[in-house]
Image (cartoon, helix red, strand yellow):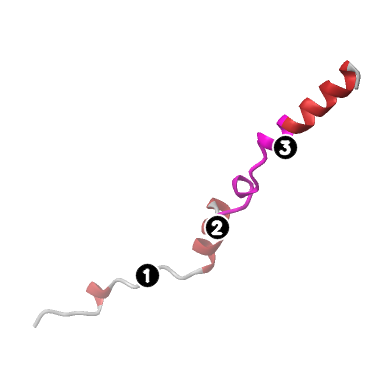
Amino acid sequence: MNVLGIVKYWRSLTAAIFDAYHPERHYMRGPGPKCHEKRARSTKPPVDLRLRLRPG
């Protein structure tokens, strides 16, 4: 085995052991600000219950 073969083996071994790719860091975890903005525009504003209650 020559030096180039040892270097290739060492790089593949270290890449397999210390893999820096973590797929859980790349997945979306929930709705983002655009989704909240879109939902806020499509829903009616809340009704103020104080207008319906009359003291008396």
Name the residue that disc number 3 marks: 16
Residue 12, how many percent across, how many down?
Answer: 79, 32
Q: Residue at 72% x, 37% y: name it.
A: 16
Foreground tag (2 vs 3): 3
Q: Which residue is mark 2?
A: 31
**Looking at the image, which residue is at 34% across and 73% down?**
47
Question: The disc labelled 1 sits on which kind of residue?
Answer: Pro
SS class, disc 1: loop
Where residue 17 sits in the image (x, y, percent)?
A: 67, 36
Number of callouts: 3
Kind of residue sitting beneath label 3: Ala
Position in image of residue 28 (x %, y %): 60, 53
Q: Position of residue 52 (x, y in %)?
A: 24, 79
Specify the segment rendered in magenta. 14-31
Above or below, 18 against 23 in this view is above
Q: Nearer the viewer, residue 14 or 35?
A: 14
Q: Residue furthest front?
A: 1
Mark 1 nearby-residue class (10 Å; few <14, some 14–19, many ≥20)? few
Relative placement, left or right, of 38 versus 10 is: left
Q: Identity of the amino acid at label 2?
A: Pro
CA neighbours of label 2 inside 10 A, class few (<14), some (14 to 19), many (20+): few
Kindly report the distance in space between the C-alpha atoms of the residues bearing marks 2 and 3. 34 Å
N-terminal-most mark, 2 or 3: 3
Residue 19 can be seen in this image:
no
Disc on res. 46: 1
Q: Residues within 10 Å of mark 3 (few under 14, many from 20)?
A: few
